[in-house]
């Protein structure tokens, strides 16, 4: 079921929009987040490598797949928070959201649970990695979500409101 939104644009059903958020978040990690991590690693800023296959608990899946799953979860959160935004506004909101929210959770919740120092031990070089890779995730997630917004429901053609 489709519901009209502002300016004659059409949006997916709420459940479909959450699914789009998840898919967009996964793609945001697999492409944008991991490429940003690769760039930071190449620059010698972080020891972490992109597409790390070291397994994580409790299911023993590769780190990059775990990150992709959690990127999808954050994508659902973003879809809930920014459901009324459109196009560039959505993308900008997701870049800012990505740089802040997942980074703070990683620093102050995930790190202590894993026995790691909070906020990278408050070392500036370690602290800058999270906001950069998570902002990259936000950019990718926002771009994919905005792309989905411009699709005509039920097909892969551009909507009448598409400018580009």
Image (cartoon, grey):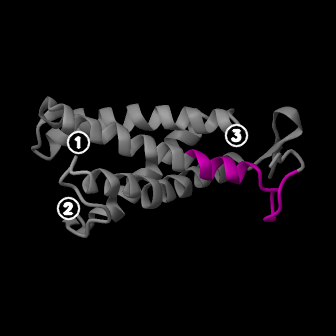
Q: Which residue is drawn at 58% across and 42% down?
A: 79
Task: Give the vertical position of 90 relative to 55 (above or below).
Answer: above
Q: Give the range drawn in magenta.
A: 142-159
Q: Can you tell which quarter of the image residue 82 is in? A: top right
Left or right, 64 with respect to 57, comes to: right
Q: Which residue lies furthest to the front in this view?
A: 43
Which numbered disc, 3 or 2, marks the residue closer to the eye?
A: 3
Badge 3: how crowded within 10 Å, few (<14), some, or many (20+)? some
Q: 117 or 132: nearer the eye?
A: 132
Residue placed at 22% from the left, 46% from the top? 45
CA gap, disc 3 to disc 2? 37 Å
Residue 151 horizontal side relative to residue 73, left or right:
right
From the image, state whether disc 1 or disc 3 is nearer to you: 3
Q: How far apart are marks 1 and 3 (CA)?
A: 31 Å
Of the image marks 1 and 3, the number of the one nearer the N terminus: 3
Number of numbered discs visible in the structure rendering:
3
Which mark identifies residue 57? 2
The circle drawn on residue 87 is 3
Residue picked out by circle 1: 110
- Alpha carbon distance from label 1 to label 2: 13 Å
Write the residue at 49% across / 43% down. 138
Horizontal placement of 68 versus 15: left or right?
left
Q: Do the residues labelled 3 and 2 touch (CB within 8 Å)?
A: no
Whether residue 74 appears in this view of the structure is no
Against 14, residue 156 (above or below) is below
Look at the image and say whether residue 149 sits in the magenta stretch. Answer: yes
Q: Residue 26 carries which label?
A: none
Residue at left 43%, top 40%? 135
């Amino acid at each position: 079921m489709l519901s009209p939104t502002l300016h004659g644009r059409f949006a997916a059903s709420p459940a479909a929009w959450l699914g789009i958020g998840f898919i967009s978040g996964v793609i945001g990690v697999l492409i944008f987040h991991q490429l940003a991590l690769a760039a930071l690693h190449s620059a010698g800023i972080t020891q972490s490598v992109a597409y790390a296959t070291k397994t994580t608990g409790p299911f023993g899946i590769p780190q990059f797949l775990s990150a992709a799953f959690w990127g999808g979860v954050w994508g659902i959160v973003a879809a809930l928070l920014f459901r009324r935004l459109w196009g560039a506004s959505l993308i900008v909101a997701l870049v800012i959201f990505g740089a802040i929210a997942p980074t703070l959770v990683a620093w102050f919740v995930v790190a202590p649970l894993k026995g790691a120092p909070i906020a990278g031990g408050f070392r500036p070089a370690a602290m800058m990695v999270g906001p950069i890779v998570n902002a990259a995730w936000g950019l990718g997630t926002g771009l994919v979500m905005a792309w989905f917004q411009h699709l005509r429901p039920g097909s892969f053609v551009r909507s009448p409101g598409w400018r580009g």
